[in-house]
Image: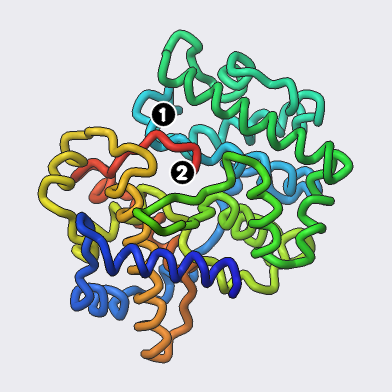
Amino acid sequence: MSLFQEIRDASSAVAERADFVRIDEAALKKYALAIPAAEMAAQKLDPSRHFLDRGADTAAFIVTLDTINFGSGWFPHLKKRPGLSGYFTIASALNDFFRAEGPLTMSRLVHLNGAECARIFGQDAESPLAYELMQRFATALNDLGRLLIDSYRGSFTTLIESAGNSAEQLVRLLAAMPFFDDVAQFRDKRVPFYKRAQLTAADLALAFDGRGWGRFDDLGELTIFADNLVPHVLRMDGVLRYDPDLAARIDSEELIPAGSVEEVEIRAGALHAVELMVTELRGAGRPATAMSIDFMLWNRGQSPQYKLAKPRHRTRSVFY
């Protein structure tokens, strides 16, 4: 069984046994068939926020960014750039750094600390929760530097090439780092998500237009990148139904603990819902992948009608 099928099966099993999150399958079918084809086709990286068209340095940027592409549970406490979300604040700061200095050297990756990350990402070291996230960024980047030195001759592109054009293999290689090893436990069941490892393959594919360091022959097998925005959009649009007490906790901005039953059900429910949407669309003769639907939902979630109407769930996790 492929790793991606294992992820699908595990999330399906969680959805079937869930107590707090339910998929409204009738609403889902109508919702899926109403998705405009143009929305699913609109997949691109913003060149003003991402270090693109720079060859090997772009590969280094994507891997570095996705190594620290987490922290949504800390984002309310982040010092954000005007008009930008937490993610785009971090991406823009890293883009600025690469434009000024180029990729982080292996030595610097290994020795980064929270204070230096705070400087790179424009954060106030006096803000305890923002600094807590910067310390986790430093740990993640230290792990990346050690992995590259120990196994890939200190080369980002050697890491990518070692995957042999397989997104699944890239996920497995990245999961050697603890902050990429995104596997939950749901009662007696192991539930893998590998959100950021899968996203790294997808982002490389977008950055290189599916060629060279962006060529992955199994890209269509990716699942969604299970985070807190995609389930929020599905909840707002009536596809996911939350237990009233869970909904009230989220709406009051109570943190949902990482690895809790509720948190795993939210992520797994969103993942399985998108798989059902893929099935509906393909059954109607429309091409669809979980990745294309994920990007569509994530982009929808940037609009005020989703961001401001109700809070999304917040979890302090290194996985999203």
Q: Residue at x 51, y 53 (%)?
A: 195
Tag 1 and tag 2, C-beta contact below 8 Å? no
Around disc 1, counting alpha carbons within 10 Å, would you say few (fewer than 14), some (14 to 19), or many (20 or more)?
Answer: few
Around disc 2, counting alpha carbons within 10 Å, would you say few (fewer than 14), some (14 to 19), or many (20 or more)?
Answer: many
Q: Is residue 10 left or right of residue 245?
A: right
* Separation (CA) of disc 1 from disc 2: 22 Å
Q: Residue at x 31, y 54 (%)?
A: 266
Q: Nearer the viewer, mark 1 or mark 2?
A: 2
Quarter of the image with the N terminus in it: bottom right
Q: Is residue 146 above or below residue 203?
A: above
Q: Is residue 228 left or right of residue 195?
A: left
Can residue 236 be seen by looking at this rendering? Answer: no
Can residue 66 be seen by looking at this rendering? Answer: yes
Give the quarter of the image for residue 286: bottom left
Q: Mark 1 or 2 closer to N-term?
A: 1
- Find disc 2 in the rendering and name its residue: 320
Q: Is residue 89 above or below residue 240?
A: above
- Residue occupying the far left of the picture: 244
Name the kind of residue labelled 1 in the image: Pro
Secondary structure, mark 1, is loop
Q: Residue at x 79, y 50 (%)?
A: 159
Depth check, front residue: 269 or 109: 269
Name the kind of residue labelled 2 in the image: Tyr
- Find disc 1 in the rendering and name its residue: 82
Q: Position of residue 68 (x, y in %)?
A: 57, 37
Q: Position of residue 314 (x, y in %)?
A: 32, 38
